[in-house]
Amino acid sequence: MFSKGALDGVKVLDLSRLLPGPFCSMVLADHGADVTSVEDKKFQSDGLFFNDVNRNKRHMSLDLKKEKGMEIFYKLAKDTDVILEGFRPGVVKRLGVDYESIKKINPNVIYCSITGYGQDGPMRDIVGHDVNYMSTAGVLDLVGSRDQPPTIPGVQLADIAGGSMNAVIGILMALYSRSVTGKGQYIDISMTDGMIPFMTLPLYFSSLGMEQKKSDTIFSHRYAFYNTYETKDGKHFSIGAVEFRFWKQLCDYLEVPEYANLQYDENRKDEIIRALQNIFLTKTIDEWDAELKDKEFCYSRVLNLDEMMNSNMAIEREMVVEQKQKDGSTKKALGIPVKLSETPGSVRTPPDSFGESSRDILRELGYSNDEIDKFSEKEVF
């Protein structure tokens, strides 16, 4: 039996595409919100319909450049709590579905825009993607090997951490505020803004006179106690022995106690790193796992995607779940990280195909089958 979720009764219209907005609305849907994704089928030609983030939602196609398309959207918007969009600044205003326009028919609406650089400022109109937002925020300059160009991470940090998650936070704050004041509001989420706070520790250490460089900071390869190591079979693990007691225990275990009091020694840091590298190259990852996984060294094996998806931790924590598909089959899906005791989120329904719920939603709005057929003929949806 699935929980209704903490957001049961909250209606969301999602006009966004790709990853940041749809991931945000998926989080809301996972926790019970009634989410309807609205996209123009013209976008299908881009080949960028990423359906895995559409679970627990309904999806309809709609052409907002057609008069009937606008009429339908206004009907939907009049009875919704949250509208989410991810177009460039100014696009929704040209379409007539911006916050000021929607507020006239739904004064209490919460309207959230996710963009790369925000609704104002000198970069508002510049196009970009995840890598550009990390670059502008200063984050990319600290990722990669020393004396090499910055390395683009294999995960979308700015899209999800900078955009999606901050949008979720903003929407929840606005919902709470509305419950107190009765007023909706506009939320301006910039993915670049969302990445800048990731520079909190680099800024702090910089203020202490420590230059911040790729793979050469306290928490990025500068010292042996916070580093990654290769094993005999070419695998890797990480050590994060920040506290002295963890570092001393590791040195004692590896029979190099002379390094314990040299944790931050600038003159011998490279020597210590090389010494540990040579030690860890003597055994395979499984051998080190057997020895170190239960020790208090802050040790972790570096898992690849397949290993993570099949790990006991991810499965037992329900971060990897079996999701039933519409054809009766099942596939592995990522679970829900926020664990609520009374109103837990849930993976309830598989993603709609593009526009799959269009007719059902139109019928719910009061349109007859004949009218819906005419809409289809005129490519309104």
Image: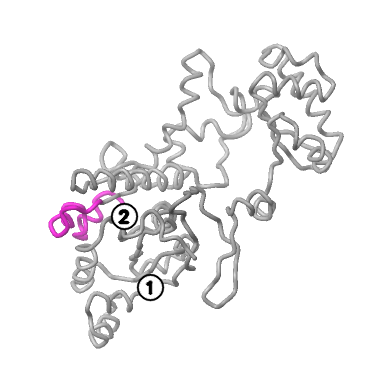
Q: Residue at x 46, y 56 (%)?
A: 345
Nearer the observer, 91 or 247: 247
Q: Vertical placement of 9 versus 155: above or below?
A: below
Q: Secondary structure at mark 1?
A: loop
**Which x, y percent locates residue 259?**
77, 16
Nearer the observer, 62 or 244: 244
Q: Is residue 108 magenta?
A: yes
Indicate the amino acid at tag 2.
Answer: Glu
Q: Is residue 29 magenta?
A: no
Q: Earlier in the sequence, mark 2 or mark 1?
A: 2
Which quadrant of the figure has residue 29? bottom left
**Which x, y percent locates residue 180?**
22, 44
Nearer the observer, 322 or 67: 322
Q: What is the magenta range?
A: 84-110
Q: Residue at x 27, y 86 (%)?
A: 369
Q: Which mark is residue 355?
A: 1
Instruction: Bin the neighbour count of mark 2 within 10 Å (Cα to Cα): few under 14, some 14-19, many 20 and up.
Output: many
Q: Vertical placement of 61 versus 288: above or below?
A: below
Q: Residue at x 81, y 25 (%)?
A: 253
Q: Which mark is residue 85?
A: 2
Determine the CA span between mark 2 and mark 1.
17 Å
The single residue placed furthest to the right in the displayed view is 282
Give the total number of marks visible in the rendering: 2
**Which x, y percent locates residue 110?**
25, 51
Instruction: Bin the neighbour count of mark 1 within 10 Å (Cα to Cα): few under 14, some 14-19, many 20 and up.
Output: some
Which quadrant of the figure has residue 68? bottom left
